[in-house]
Amino acid sequence: QVVGNEVLLTAAGAALVNSGAALPEFTLTPNDGTINGETDSATPVVNTVNDAPEVTITNTNAFTEDDGSAVENAVVATFDTSD
């Protein structure tokens, strides 16, 4: 997507980058309202990073012996992951 003098990443482009795929080449053609100028092309670079995934425990629940809170499917902890 072109806005002003910038080529912006679209949702589809962001999905490509976030999946580690290459972005396609694009070509721009200037026009003064009458005639086209010479075209120019570029291929954006995607630098892939194979970093280790991370897990963060965000909350843990305490249980008290014999109070009935320790039952099947009781939530022990919650967590977030990122890569």
Image: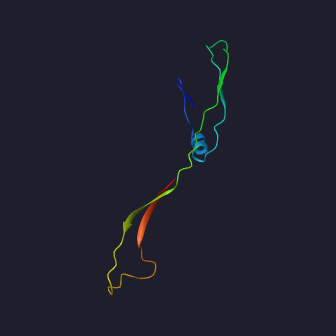
75 sits left or right of 30 in the view: left
Position of 49 with respect to 61 (left or right) is right
x and y, in percent, of residue 61 in the image: 36, 72
Q: How many marks?
A: 0
What residue is shown at x 59% (from left), y 45% (from top)?
A: 15
Q: Is residue 74 above or below residue 40?
A: below
Front position in the image: 32 or 11: 11
Question: Which residue lies at the image location 58% right of the left edge and 40% below the top edge?
Answer: 47
Residue 26 appears at what percent x and percent y?
A: 65, 29
Instruction: Place residue 67 in its image quadrant.
Output: bottom left
**Residue at point 60% right, 42% down?**
12
Rendered residue at 44%/63% (across/down): 79
Near-viewer residue (47 or 73) = 47
Nearer-the-camera pick, 80 or 11: 80
Please, which residue is most extreme toward the bottom here? 66
Q: Position of residue 75 (x, y in %)?
A: 42, 73
Where is residue 38, by image quadrant? Answer: top right
The quadrant of the rendering that contains the N terminus is top right
Instruction: Give how far across and how far down residue 14 sits, in percent.
Output: 57, 42
Q: How is the image coloured?
A: rainbow
